[in-house]
Amino acid sequence: MKVRSINKRTSNMRISEWFWGWFLIAPTTIGLIILNIIPAIQSFYMSFFKIGDFGVNNEFVGFANYVRMFNDPQVWRAVVNTLKYTVLVVPISIFLSAVIAVILNSNIKGQGIYRSIYFIPVVATPAAVTMVWRWLYNYHYGLINFVIKKIGLQPVKWIDDPNVAMISIAIIGIWSIVGYNMVLILAGLQEIPQTYYEAASIDGANSTVMFFKIILPMVSPTIFFVMITSIIQCMQVFDVIYMMINVSNPAYDKTVSLVYLFYNNTFKYYDEGYGSAIVMLLLVIISIITIIQVKLQKKWVNYL
Amino acid sequence: MQTKSKVYLVVVHTLLIIGSSVMIWPFIWMIITSFKTVTEATAMNPFKFFPSQLRLENYKGVIEQFNFLRLYFNTFSMIAINVLCAIVFSSMAAFAFARLEFPGRDFCFGIVLFQMMIPTQIFIIPQYLMVDKLGARNTIFALVFPGLVSAFGTFLLRQFFKMIPKELEYSARIDGCNIGQMFVRIMFPLVKPGLVALSIFTALFAFKNLMWPLIINPSPDAATLASALSKIQGAYSVNYPRLMAASVLAVCPMLILYFIFQKQFMQSVVTSGLTM
C-alpha cells in the first residue's frame, strides 16, 4: 500500500516535471521553429523558384538558379574574395592577438590599460568605424597618404585600386577583431597553472622551449575556438565592404563578398530565388571548412 | 617567472604603445575631424592638425538633418527589448534543458544547436517576407523580430545551470518548492554571471547589426544608428567633418557603456568562450 502511494507520488512528480519542462521551453522552441527552422526550409525551397513580387506568383524553375550561379563569374569572384579576406584576417589577427596576449600575461606594468585599449574596436559599430577608415584611406586628403607622401613614397589608392582595396578592408577586419581574440587567448593563458612553469624551469627549460612545450599546447583549445569563430565570422563579412565599396567602385569585382552579393541580388535586384541559392552556397562552404577544421583539430589541439 | 632585462621591457612597451596608438587613433582622428571645417580637414597642413576652434556646426547639422534623437530611441528600444527577451526566454528554456527530464527535450535542444550552426543569412529572406506580410516594416517590432528568442543565449545559460550542484535542487524540493519556485527563487539568481554575459552580447550584436535594420526599416525615422550611417554617408559623400560627427554620435553610447563596465565586457567574452 505504502509502496504504491510512493510510486504514485513519484509518478505525479514526474508528470509535473514534464509539464514544467514543456512550459519553460515553449517560447524558445516555438520561436525558433517560426523564426529559424521554417525560414531555413523556406530558403532552401525558394532557391528552386523564381520569386515574384512580394513573394507571390512564384514560378518553379528547378535547378536554374544553381546552374546560373555556377556559370556566374561574379559568384566565383565573390567566393575567392571571401576566402581571400578570411585567409588575410584569421591568421594575422590570431598571430597578433597571441603575441599581445603572451606579452600581457607576463605580468607587465599597465597590463589592464593595454588590454582595455586593444578591446575598444570590438565595441564600435562597424558602419561608423569604416567611415573613419575611409577618411584615413582617402586618396587626396587621407592621413595615411599624407604620411606616405611625407616619407617620399607614392600615395596609394587604398579604396579604388582593385589590387589594394581587399588589403585595406582586411586591415579594418584585423583591427576590429584583434582585441576580442586577445582577451580570449589571455584567459586561456591565465588558466595554465604556475607550477607548470616552475617545474619546467627546474628541468632547465628556457623560454623558447616553454613557449612550444607548455604555452602552445595548453592554449591550443582556445586557439581552436578563436579560429573557428573567426573563420565563420569572416566568411560572413558584409558591413565593412558594404560601407566602403559601392557597386560603381572599380574595385567592386575584387572585393565583393558572398554576403554582399547575396544582399545585392536579394534586396537591390529583388531576385530572392537567386539570393537563396547564393546563401545555400555559403552554407555549404562554411560547413566544409568547419568539418575540415574539426577533423584537423585532432592533430594539433590538446585537450586535458 | 624570471626577471626581465631592461632592454626587453623597453622594447615590449614600445611595441605595445605603438599597437595601442593604432587601436585608438581612428577614434581620436574621428573626434578631431568632427570639429573641423571642410577646408581645415582637407588643408593637409601639419600646423592645422587640430581645429582652430571647437566648432559644433557639424554636430548641429547632422542632428537636425537626421533626427538623431529618434535614432537613439529606436536603437535603445531595440536593444532593451532584445536583452529582456533573451534573458527571460533563454533562462527559462536553459533551466529546463539543463535540470529537468521530459519527453522531447533532446529533440528540442537539437533545434537550438541547429540554429547556432547555420549562418544567419539563411533566415533573412523568409523573416523579411514575414514582417512584410504582417505590414510591420518600419517599426520597432520589425527591428526586434529576429531576436525575440535566442539559441545562443539558451546554449550559454544551459552551461551555467548545469554547473549548479544537485544538492541545492534536492534541498529546495525537500523544503517544498515546486519546480517554478525553484527556478525563480534559487536557480535564476545563481546564473547571474551568465545573464550579464548574455545581456552584453545581445546588446553589442543588436547595436552593431547593419543588414537587418537596413532592409527591414528603410524609412529614415525607423532606422537604427548603424543603418542610418549608410544613408548619412550617401548624403554627405565627401563632407568628412559631417560624417565624422555622425560617427562620433553613433559610437559614443556603446563606448561610454564600455568605459563604465569594462570588466563585465571582457568577462563576458571570456565566459562565452569558455562555456562553448
Image: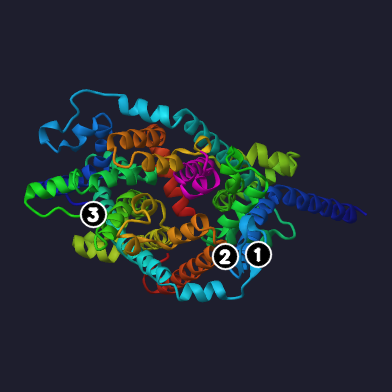
Q: Mark 3 = which residue? A: A158
Q: Nearer the viewer, residue B230 or B264?
A: B230
Mark 2: amino acid:
Gly
Q: Quadrant of the C terminus of chain A?
A: bottom left
- What sort of colour scheme is used for the picture? rainbow
State which region is magenta: B194-219
Q: Is residue B215 magenta?
A: yes
Q: Mark 2 = which residue? A: A273
Q: Quadrant of the N terminus of chain A?
A: bottom right
Q: Residue at x 51, y 64 (%)?
A: A279
Mark 1: amino acid:
Asn
Circle 2 Cα neighbour tier, 10 Å, few/some/many (<14 / 14–19 / ≥20): many
Q: Is residue A58 left or right of residue B174?
A: left
- Residue A224, given in percent of the width and then of the height, sits at 39, 63
Between discs 2 and 3, the one toward the N terminus:
3
Q: Mark 1 = which residue? A: A58
Q: With respect to residue B46, does B7 lie above or below?
A: below
Q: Mark 2 vs mark 3: tell me if same chain.
A: yes
Closer mark to the observer between disc 1 and disc 2: 1
